Image (cartoon, rainbow, N blue to C red):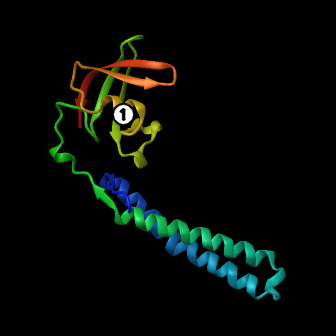
Amino acid sequence: MSQVTYYTEEGLKRLKDELHELEAVQRPAISQQIADARDKGDLSENAEYDAAKEAQGLLEAKIAKLKEVISNARIIDDSDIDDSKVYILSTVKIKNVKNGAEMQYTLVAENEADLKEKKISVESPIGKGLLGKAVGEIADVQTPNGVMQFEIVDITR
C-alpha cells in the first residue's frame, strides 16, 4: 500500500519537473545509447550495451517510483493553518533554553526538508518536539546528546 505524502505546491512542482526531465530527456538519451551499442555488433560481449541496459533499468525504476510518489501526493493548504500552535508549514522562532541561542525554522514534509533554507522535517527530532506547541511553551527535544529544551518565541506562516 502506498503512503500519502504532503507537499507544498512548489515542492510538488519540483517533483513533476524532475519526472518530466527523466521522461523527456534522459529516457531518449539512454535509448540512443542502447541503439548505438546495438549497432556495434555482437551483444553477448558488448559492455556498452550491458551498461546502457542497466542504466535504462535504473532510470525506469526511478520514473516508476516518482510517478507513485506524485500520484499519492497531497498539497497542503496553508490558508487554514492556525498560527496559535506549531503545525506543518509553520515558521517557528525558537530559543535554546540552555544557551539562549535563537533560531528560526519552517516545518515542512520530510521530502521538502532543506537545512540551508531553514526548512526542517516534521519527522525530525526538533520538528516532532515543536509540533502542537504554542508561544511560550517549552519543547523537549530528544537528541543523541540528551534532551534539549527550546522555548517557542514566535509562530508565523
Q: Position of residue 135 (x, y in %)?
A: 21, 23
Quarter occupied by the C terminus? top left
**Callout 1 crowding tier (Cα within 10 Å): few <14, some 14–19, many ≥20:** many
Q: Is residue 66 above or below residue 37?
A: above
Relative depth, front residue between 135 and 123: 123
Q: In the image, is 27 to the left or to the right of 83?
A: right
Of the 4 image quadrants, the one containing the N terminus is bottom left
Q: Is residue 140 left or right of residue 39?
A: left
Q: Is 134 situated left or right of 126 in this image? A: left
Q: What residue type is disc 1 on?
A: Gly
**To which quarter of the image does residue 105 belong?**
top left
For the residue pair 71 and 39, the one nearer the viewer reads as 71
- In the orientation shown, which residue stands out farthest toward the front? 1
Residue 40, image x, y percentages: 80, 86
What residue is at 18 percent from the left and 42 percent from the top?
81
Residue that mark 1 sits on: 127
Q: Position of residue 116 (x, y in %)?
A: 47, 37
The residue sitting at 62% across, 80% down in the picture is: 31
Relative depth, front residue between 135 and 17: 135
The number of numbered discs placed on residues in the rendered structure image is 1
Q: Identify the image quadrant of residue 89.
A: top left
Q: Quadrant of residue 142?
A: top left
Q: Residue at x 51, y 20 (%)?
A: 145
Residue 121 locus on image (x, y percent): 39, 40
Callout 1 secondary element: helix
